[in-house]
Image (tube, rainbow, N blue to C red):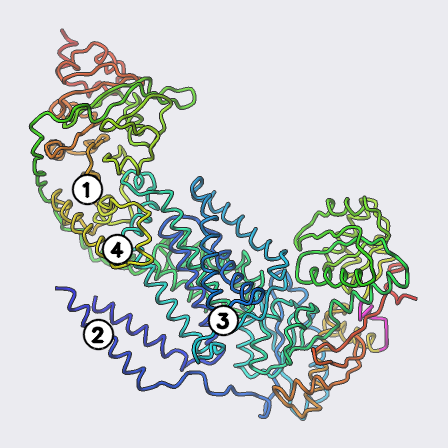
Amino acid sequence: MRYRIGLVALLAVVAWGLPYGLNLYAMHVADVALVFAVLAIGLGLAMGVAGQVNLAQVAFFGVGSYAVAILTTHYGYGFWPAALLSLVATVVIGLLVGTPALRVQSHYLGIVTLGLAVAFTNWVTNAALAGGASGISGIPVPPLGGVDLSSDYLYWYVEVVVFAAALAFGLFVVRTPLGRRMRAMRDDSLAAGAVGAEVPMLRMAAFGLASVYGGLAGVLYAGLIRYVSPDTFSMTNMFLLLAMVIIGGRQSLVGCVVGALALSLLREALSDASTYAQLGYGVVVVLAVVFAPTGLAGLPARLRSGWRKRRGEGASAAVLGPFRPFPAAPQASAPVGPGPLLEVQQISKRFRGLWALREVSLSVGAGEIRGIVGPNGSGKTTLFNVISGLYRPSGGTVRLGGAPVGGRRPYQLSHAGLARTFQNLRLFNNLTVRENVLVAADRSRTRGIWRYAVWQVGVVRRDRALRARADAMLDQFGLSAFADALPRSLPYGIQRRVEIARAMVSGPRLLLLDEPAAGLNGEEVRQLGEIVRSIRDSGVTVVIIEHNMGLVMSLCERITVLASGEVIAEGGPAEVAATPRVIEAYLGDSAMSKDVPPVIATEVAQ
Amino acid sequence: MHTPRHIRGALIGAAVLTTILATACSAPGKSSTSSSGSGKGPIKIAVVDAQSGQLSSLGHWESNGAKLAVDQWNAKGGINGRKIQLDVFDDQGDPTVGTNLARKIASDGYIAMIGTSESAVTQAMAPILQQEQIPNITSGQADSMVKLGSPFLFLNGPTSTTYDETLAKYVVDTKGIKSIAMITNNGGYGKGEHDAFLASLSKRGVTPLTDQVVTTDQKDFSAALTTIRQKNPQLVFIGSEEVEAGLIVKQARDLGITVPFAGSAPQGTPVFAETAGAANVENTIVSSPYLGNDISDASRTFAAAYKAAYGDDAELHGAKAYDGTSIVLTALKTSNVATGKKLADAIRATKYNGLLGSFAFDSTGVGIFATSIGVISNGKLAAAS
């Protein structure tokens, strides 16, 4: 930490002293490079942090500087009022450009945003207001007390201040709840929704942030060059910007800055051979994407891990701690509530011609552990997906605690007290174990992000509270030793446990576990049984899909059997095992016959 | 446990910073930039043009023209016994790169600049060149550059207004043609042509039958041309660069538009004629200060020297750059290698008889106010009778 503060102080001194050592040309190049650095932070936030492919960043840049140009030259505004208004304009445009992200993602989003960026360039080329192809000149020098900002040297200090604030705010966002949710959304938007992150709002927030940085860069550009024309916001420059972010390392804002500065200076150094330079950028980008997806920023970590491997240091010597049971809820002993906690009525789900679920009904009382079994393809996971809001049912209703929740989005259900795990682990792979749990611990709504703009202290306080809560949960599950590890590096059994901890930290009323024992060894399965029982005893209702019949039979009070999308039996373990249709369903599927518990086998033999 | 340490670190950092700030408070960048004007060694002149990208052919022609002029002066012994050093810089057609280059040539001690061929880049560079007091002779012709009012910015040719006023005068006043269609592109050049020609027409009370605007990278113009054919004009005005204008004419003939075209300098070039097809460009009316290499003795000498140096045929852009560079060199000679404002004043005072005509600069930096009208007949551009 000390080392880091020292580094920041050193950089501050360098930034302050730089103008004394540079000639005008180098100073101007540095000024331009810093504008691009601000722009790249914005792109890094949208693309690297939130995973939104945003090829319109150069258009945000353009909107910012054109707005300043138009407001100052056509409407006679002062530079600073115009700068403020143009920031607002850029954010409005940014949110508009971001709306397609609600429907499309990845490369489709790239195409849409690229189209909008091209539309912007076309508009400024044609519009009389924007001066057409010859652009707008005569933007006034920003006034600042008695300081003459027409000097590139003094302008540098304005840029450094804005840049430092912009970078600090960006890093602040990344490390606090908003950025964590964005990163979670980037890694797995489905799971992020299931733990309560409002994915649509977060996508808009990502575009909003990107446009703020675009607008800032645009204002700085307008004040520095004092002339705007369409060529500056061309696709060539969008590609250059993309190259900066990818080469620098898109998941790290500092990497984006390094990339922007490096490429700006390189471009200048190679200006006599620009044709080859363009080709060179292309090659370097491809190499970076293939061989160093984390870019320059990821290199130290890669080198470090390579070094460790060579020295033969084992991964982590950390051990899984014991699970400490939850305190039992006082009312857990008494039968609770008037009605069932989860009530599924006549749910059907159809995929084209296939009925994955056909009029499935079941009701789970509060404090129950319900098992759901059935052969592969019988619709168990589809049922979970319908209950947790990932699928919209073709018919029927779902009630949670008596209230109908059909058609609600996953994040809304999460806030209503529902948590789940996934059959194929869905942890956020680029977040540490602690961060995985932190994302789910955050119960706030995204609309609370106004705090980021005006009351950062509140954000820090809340983050601290969340961390305490997450650490407590990790400790409870015996995962403290792995808190700073990435999930991928952990054994499968531990990853399973992390996913349950992540689900529990949201404080659910109802927990859906989708094959939690798959891939676990005997001891781990025993621990799992213990954990699930403790969860139930703490007052949480549990529904569990499981193929491990031993676990189901010992754990569940009631079992629902699905086959071909229909409920074929329901009742206590022994009762269900004796049902002829269940035996038939299981023996009909030879692959599953090994799962037939001994009790059924005896039945059949008799 | 952690917090005090943070605070201590931050305090140390802040203390170091304030100490340094307090000890040295003078603003940076006050030292004056060196200039090669009064010293010895070569006289440094910069050519800034797009050497890569879409406009690179234009940039190439211009740097050739400028080099030819400098080589000829150097062969005669330079100026005051000093050689002239001409260096070419690539602005990539990007205004931001242009501003970097403006600072670069200032820092490296260049005392004058030739270029650029793109008005947008020139406009971006103009405030810096004015601040650095480096005279700049540009090849652009957009009227918006003149409006900048920089005393260090000169044009090596007429403005769009001159081109199109001359053209409109010939077409409307002399020939009496009033039903005119327009097709222009939305690039810097095309927009300038569009605005200037439209202004000249409306001054004469003529409204174009149709006003079609295409983009700079368009390849198919049938929609615009079909509209033009329906209006049945007597003449079609083109405001576009060589290749695109050639494509437009070719496609217009294919669609059955038989009336003549009219335009500015690009329509007088071999590239235009080759793209459109020799038969298709017959009767095209051209407003240009440089109708061709055979127009005068001076142009024949220039074209021969150009051909000998580069193996290519000379054309307008090379001629403009040649004239512009010659004017700068003449001003350097008459002013005894002055720099900055004195050199700008010397350029403004220079009367020069060049390939494009007689230059006499006014306060706006424009030196030539007339173009000639040429008509293509039998595949050759000749002055209109």
Q: Which kind of residue does numbered mark 3 sit on?
A: Leu
Give the answer, above or below, for where A582 lies relative to B358: above
Badge 2 and badge 3 both on one subunit: no
Q: Secondary structure at mark 2?
A: helix
| Main secondary structure found in the magenta portion | loop
Q: Position of residue A331 (x, y in %)?
A: 8, 31
Kindly indicate the quadrant of the structure image that contains residue A243. Answer: bottom left
Q: Residue furthest right?
A: B385
Disc 2 target residue: B11
Quadrant placement of the N terminus of chain A: bottom left
Residue identifier under label 4: A459
Which amino acid lies under the numbered mark 2 shown in the image of this protein? Answer: Leu
Check the image and report above or below for A567 versus A107: above
Cα separation, mark 3 vs mark 4, equals: 34 Å
Q: Nearer the viewer, residue B81 or A452?
A: A452
Please name whichever residue, A309 or A69, is drawn nearer the observer in this view of the structure: A69
Residues packed near mark 1 inside 10 Å, few (<14), some (14 to 19) or many (20 plus): many
